[in-house]
Image (tube, rainbow, N blue to C red):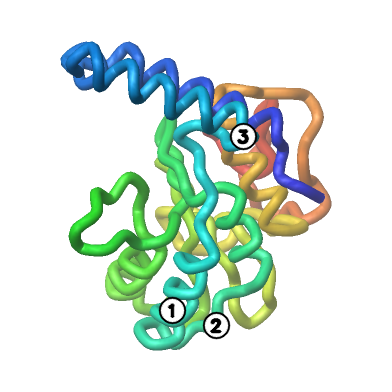
Amino acid sequence: MNLNEQLLRELSDLFLGDLRSSEYYRALPADDRANLEKQLARDAANGVRPLVPGASPDQIAKLCARSEAELGVTLPASLLRVLTVVDGFVENGLSLYGVDRESTEDETVPGLIAQNPALWSTFPETAQKYLFVGDSELWFFAYEIPTATYVALSRSTVRPVHRFSGIEALVNDMLAQAIGHFDDDSEDTIGALPSQAPKLRGTDFSLN
């Protein structure tokens, strides 16, 4: 399974709409606004989704090194592959963690390295068992290290409520919920756990 390119483009369009309606954008000098629009147009022409970038090889290498040094975790290749396509996002109460920024850079999405020690401290039973990769109002999304599978965890119990067929299914579901797509067809229904809550249209695991 691949990431859903249509959903990624819709997320990009949503972010562009938010940008252009923002006070920040309206307050830009005319020349700066024109230059920004030219850059966005160049990105689109080059096949880059504006405001939804992927991580660079250098960023991925630094992320891997920091994970080994600070978390003691070897990042799964599947997660790295996804981050090269979409380096995290925050929308509609959902967050996909991305590459941690340097101290001199603005943090636009929660950083993977920063989030995990904080969550492991809050939920000690998850340390070295789950690598948290995202969250929503009701769920944590994580890589279960012993089983090498991606799961949704209840925020109240920190127990699995759903197992995904892969990270692409997880991120596609997050994208659909972030954008507000609720289709009859599920991305991934095979891994549902018996104890999960009843499903609503467009979700594999949640009541979002």
Does residue 61 lie above or below 158 as drawn? below
Q: Circle 1 sits in a helix, a strand or a loop, which is it?
A: helix
Answer with left or right where residue 31 lies relative to residue 60: left
Question: Which of disc 3 and disc 2 is earlier in sequence?
Answer: 3
Q: CA distance from mark 2 to mark 3?
A: 33 Å
Answer with left or right where residue 53 lies relative to residue 7: left
Displayed quadrant of residue 4: top right
Kindly indicate whether the residue at mark 2 contacts the one at mark 1 (C-beta within 8 angstroms).
yes
- Residue 13, percent across and down? 52, 21
Does residue 64 lie above or below 200 as drawn? below
- For disc 2, the marked residue is 74
Answer with left or right where residue 83 lies relative to residue 170: left
Residue type at mark 2: give it: Thr
- Is the residue marked by circle 3 packed among few (<14), some (14-19), or many (20+) residues within 10 Å? few
Q: Which mark is residue 67?
A: 1
Does residue 147 lie above or below 113 as drawn? below
- Residue located 65% across and 30% down the image: 7
Question: Which of disc 2 and disc 1 is earlier in sequence?
Answer: 1
- Residue 37, percent across and down? 40, 20
Kindly indicate whether the residue at mark 1 contacts the one at mark 3 (C-beta within 8 angstroms).
no
Question: Which of disc 1 and disc 3 is earlier in sequence?
Answer: 3
- For disc 3, the marked residue is 46
- Mark 3 vs mark 1, foreground winner is 3
Displayed quadrant of residue 10: top right
